[in-house]
Image (tube, rainbow, N blue to C red):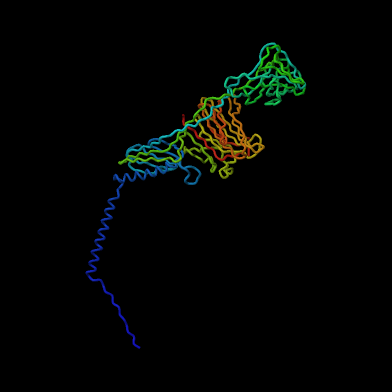
């Protein structure tokens, strides 16, 4: 068998081919090098007009991106802009950014975050201005209910005393229609002053009450308010004197006739009461007597002073709120740049701001970055974070705003709170200590308490000139859970507007009392309540109108 072998051959490049390839490669390299050189010359340096414009554009983009998220302005001048931003690092607090230029030509524009080191975002700034025009809206508030000073609304104080011995289960009283000013919407009975003396045996008692009157002038049996008076508390036996008996009853109708009566409780003779007979008949006042059967005596009257306070409507007010819809940024570094950044949150212009959603320890919050915590525990000590649960604070401590101040400009308070137990008289409480000026101030107390039928009772009171708690509003919310309350305080008008669960309950005038305390807001459980809860709180202090 014969095997044949096949041999293959490879041809090398010729000298001409190699030379031609070198020429082509050299030409390509020269062309690419020229392109790179031209491109490098096309890129501006920082000192060129094009480079400066590019740097300004980058700076404007950074500033505008921050301004879009602004929540609250802390600094607002032509060369400095400071504001808060939503939480970016997950600590529950907002962030604070500050843009600042020294106003010296050639100095840089810097940006600092949360008080940290200032970083340069634009060199060689020749001129710069931040322009943040505001837009205003007016919030209309209902005319305030004005509670007048205490006055005598009915009386008889003549001469010629006859005395009536109150014994058994007898009653004596005065049927009357109050003498009130024009424009009164309703009035409050505060106290009565009969001319009275104790019996020699000071063991008796009597019931003092106010009721509506029938058309005849006799009591209709519906008791509005009553108190028990012990004989031992009356003026000395056989010495007639004007004696004050507190008998608070609110919301009385100006045109309705009422009866104030004094009834012996059956524990012996309780008092001697002065009265007068032989008077001209009066259509709006008469003595009534019950000695087994009620009777009217039009020509007789008790010696009595009936005190009350009138309510009337004041003038409706407007609260002007100002917001920042955009910021204009003018940077002059040759060439000049101009940008307008829209504030998506339209931050309100405020002199003070406190907000809590109870996701973090309130004593660690500092919304305005004034280096002081926004809240503190009353009396000092640590806040119990164990009482925070998914954005709800079950209050076992009292916390208050910091720093304290006068709070003499409009204040808007919003909160969601509730009482989860039926403890009588307890609940969730708020104190607004406001309008501090010249040694005077106002204390507004909000109280939310759960009722036995699982509703929420909302009460607002103010402290009057005699340091007594004066009721302004009492209402009941059908829902057993959340109560959303909004209070708008206008210190210049001594008035507060109230909204509960979206329902406008009108405005009320409050009184001032003597105090050296500073203005503040306090949140607390009332009377050691264990069911007081708060979900969120917002306190906004507007600038001087």
* Quadrant of the image occupied by residue 69: top left
Tell me residue 371's x, y (percent). Answer: 47, 38
Residue shown at 52% from the left, 41% from the top: 364
* Quadrant of the image occupied by residue 146: top right
Pick the front one: 181 or 202: 181
* Quadrant of the image occupied by residue 517: top right
Tell me residue 392's x, y (percent). Answer: 57, 42
Q: Is residue 187 left or right of residue 139?
A: right
Pick the front one: 1 or 425: 1
Q: Is residue 408 left or right of residue 276?
A: left
Q: Residue furthest bottom?
A: 1
Pick the front one: 465 or 189: 189
Q: Is residue 106 left or right of residue 394?
A: left
Q: Is residue 301 above or below residue 513?
A: above
Q: Is residue 65 left or right of residue 39?
A: right
Quadrant in which the N terminus appears: bottom left
Tell me residue 490's x, y (percent). Answer: 51, 29
Q: Is residue 16 above or below residue 61?
A: below
Residue shown at 70% from the left, 22% from the top: 219
Q: Is residue 464 visible?
A: yes
Tell me residue 172's x, y (percent). Answer: 72, 19
Q: Residue furthest front?
A: 215
Residue shown at 62% from the left, 26% from the top: 251
Q: Is residue 465 visible?
A: no
Q: Is residue 426 above or below residue 33?
A: above
Q: How many marks?
A: 0
């Amino acid at each position: 068998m014969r095997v044949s072998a096949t041999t293959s051959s490879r041809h090398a490049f010729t000298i001409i081919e190699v030379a031609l390839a070198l020429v082509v490669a050299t030409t390509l390299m020269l062309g690419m090098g020229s392109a790179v050189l031209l491109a490098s010359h096309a890129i501006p340096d920082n000192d060129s007009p094009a480079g400066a414009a590019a740097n300004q554009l980058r700076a404007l983009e950074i500033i505008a991106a921050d301004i879009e998220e602004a929540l609250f302005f802390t600094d607002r001048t032509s060369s400095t802009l400071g504001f808060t931003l939503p939480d970016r690092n997950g600590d529950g607090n907002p962030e604070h950014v500050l843009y600042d230029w020294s106003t010296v030509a050639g100095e840089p524009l810097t940006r600092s975050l949360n008080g940290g080191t200032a970083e340069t975002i634009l060199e060689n700034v020749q001129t710069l201005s931040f322009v943040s025009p505001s837009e205003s809206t007016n919030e209309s508030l209902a005319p305030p209910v004005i509670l007048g000073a205490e006055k005598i609304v009915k009386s008889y104080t003549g001469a010629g005393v006859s005395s009536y011995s109150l014994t058994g289960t007898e009653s004596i009283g005065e049927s009357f229609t109050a003498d009130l000013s024009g424009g009164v919407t309703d009035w409050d009975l505060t106290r009565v002053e009969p001319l009275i003396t104790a019996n020699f045996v000071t063991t008796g008692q009597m019931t003092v009450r106010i009721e509506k009157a029938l058309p005849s002038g006799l009591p209709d049996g519906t008791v509005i308010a009553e108190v028990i008076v012990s004989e031992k508390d009356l003026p000395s036996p056989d010495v007639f004197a004007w004696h004050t008996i507190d008998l608070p009853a609110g919301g009385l109708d100006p045109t309705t006739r009422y009866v104030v009566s004094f009834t012996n409780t059956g524990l012996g003779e309780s008092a001697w009461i002065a009265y007068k007979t032989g008077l001209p008949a009066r259509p709006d006042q008469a003595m009534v007597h019950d000695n087994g059967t009620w009777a009217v005596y039009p020509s007789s009257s008790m010696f009595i002073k009936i005190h009350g306070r009138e309510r009337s409507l004041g003038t409706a007010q407007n609260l002007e709120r100002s917001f920042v819809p955009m910021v204009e940024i003018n940077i002059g570094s040759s060439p000049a740049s101009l940008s307008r950044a829209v504030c998506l949150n339209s931050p309100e212009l405020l002199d003070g701001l406190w907000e809590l959603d109870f996701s973090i320890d309130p004593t660690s919050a500092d919304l305005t970055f004034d280096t002081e915590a926004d809240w503190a525990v009353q009396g000092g000590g640590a806040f119990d974070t164990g009482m925070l649960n998914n954005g709800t604070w079950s209050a076992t401590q009292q916390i208050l705003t910091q720093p304290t101040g006068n709070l003499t400009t409009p204040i808007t308070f919003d909160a969601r709170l509730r009482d989860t137990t039926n403890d009588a008289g307890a609940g969730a409480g708020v104190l607004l200590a406001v309008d501090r000026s010249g040694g005077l101030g106002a204390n507004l107390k909000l109280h939310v308490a759960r009722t036995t039928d699982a509703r929420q009772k909302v009460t607002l009171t103010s402290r009057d000139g005699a340091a007594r708690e004066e009721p302004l509003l009492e209402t009941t919310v059908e829902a057993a859970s959340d109560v959303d309350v909004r209070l708008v305080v206008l210190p210049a008008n001594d008035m507060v507007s109230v909204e509960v669960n979206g329902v406008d309950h009108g405005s009320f005038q409050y009184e001032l009392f003597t105090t050296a305390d500073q203005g503040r807001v306090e949140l607390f459980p009332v009377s050691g309540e264990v069911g007081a809860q708060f979900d969120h709180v917002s306190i906004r202090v507007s600038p001087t109108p």
